[in-house]
Amino acid sequence: MTDYSYIDTPEELALLIKKTRESSTGILAMDFEEESNLHVYGEHLCIIQLYDGDNYFVIDALAIARTAEGKALIKDLLEGPETKIMFDCSSDAAIVRKSLGIQLKNIYDIRLAAKALGFDGNLSGLIARNLEAETESAAEKKKYQKANWMKRPIPQAQLNYALNDVKYLFALKTSLEEEMRQKLSPSAIKQFSNNMKRCASQKHKDKPGWEKICNYHVLSYAEKVYIKYFFNARDALARKANVPPTNIMEKQKIVQMAKAGTWEGVLEGPTLRYTNAFEKARLDAEKDINKPKKG
């Protein structure tokens, strides 16, 4: 078991940030564990794992973000001047942007370094490639990726898994930078550096959830309108019950209702109790479809 400090109050986080800013290195290895419509409704930053090269920290982001002071401190940490070493920061950046309004800054994404060298695998594969160290099995990784990080206290086995994700980041950064110096041209290294500056930035405008449904682009105008209203009805039901939207209804049902232009003949069993919400969505969609076109 890795020794670590568990931080779950704003006061403790403020002290950690102060000590980090006073340190001479200004570099942290960082990773997140999050919830994304798997056990409850919505996207949530659950914990932040940090390693400063000597000490490990687990920051209980759920507990700390309950107050305005705590949210401000998390923002200070994630947008602060320290270099944060991560692996594939894109999904993590999206989570904190959408759930907390935070833009990750000063990120060193070692996945970009690995890709510049022709490696496009996962973190475990990169650790094996560059450090010849073994990490958790694929089955263990899948197990903990699907674990409920919202529950408290967090089981020790889950915390051990989480800390392993920051354990090797310093060593990987050193190894990859040395390999790049040996194998890459100055122009390739410059391109890598330019890419790194943008690695945590939002690449594309966030699409509404209904536009992410498979084959949305091939639907007719009316079907797209129905999908929007049926999707939002399902979302409202899930939010009220604090359950993942798929617990209310699978996306395929929304597509079926959109193509039929109604919930009737599609909903059955337990989902029939939601008919009032979907009937209102149907009527609102029809008003939208039939409203006069501008111009």
Image: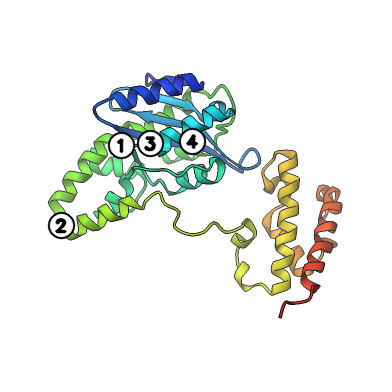
Q: Amino acid at mark 3?
A: Gly
Whether tag 3 and tag 1 are in contact, CB under 8 A, the answer is: no
| Horizontal relation, residue 188 to residue 278: left or right | left
Determine the secondary structure under disc 1.
helix
For marks 1 and 4 on the same chain, the one whose residue lies earlier in the sequence: 4
**At numbered mark 3, what does the secondary structure look like: helix, strand or loop?**
loop
Q: CA distance from mark 3 to mark 1?
A: 19 Å
Query: Counting residues from the N terminus, which is met first, the one under dot 2 or under dot 1?
Result: 1
- In three-dimensional space, the C-alpha distance between marks 1 and 4, rounded to whole angstroms, equals 16 Å
Which residue does the image show at 73% across and 72% down from the upper left? 222
Q: Residues within 10 Å of mark 3 (few under 14, many from 20)?
A: some
Where disc 4 sits, the SS reads strand
* Amino acid type of the residue that numbered disc 1 sits on in the rendered structure: Leu
Mark 4 packing: few (<14 Cα in 10 Å), some, or many (20+)? Answer: many
Question: Tag on residue 181?
Answer: none
Amino acid at circle 2: Pro
Residue 272, horizontal then vertical, whole percent: 85, 51
Residue 235, percent from left and from top: 71, 49
Q: Which residue is mark 4?
A: 33
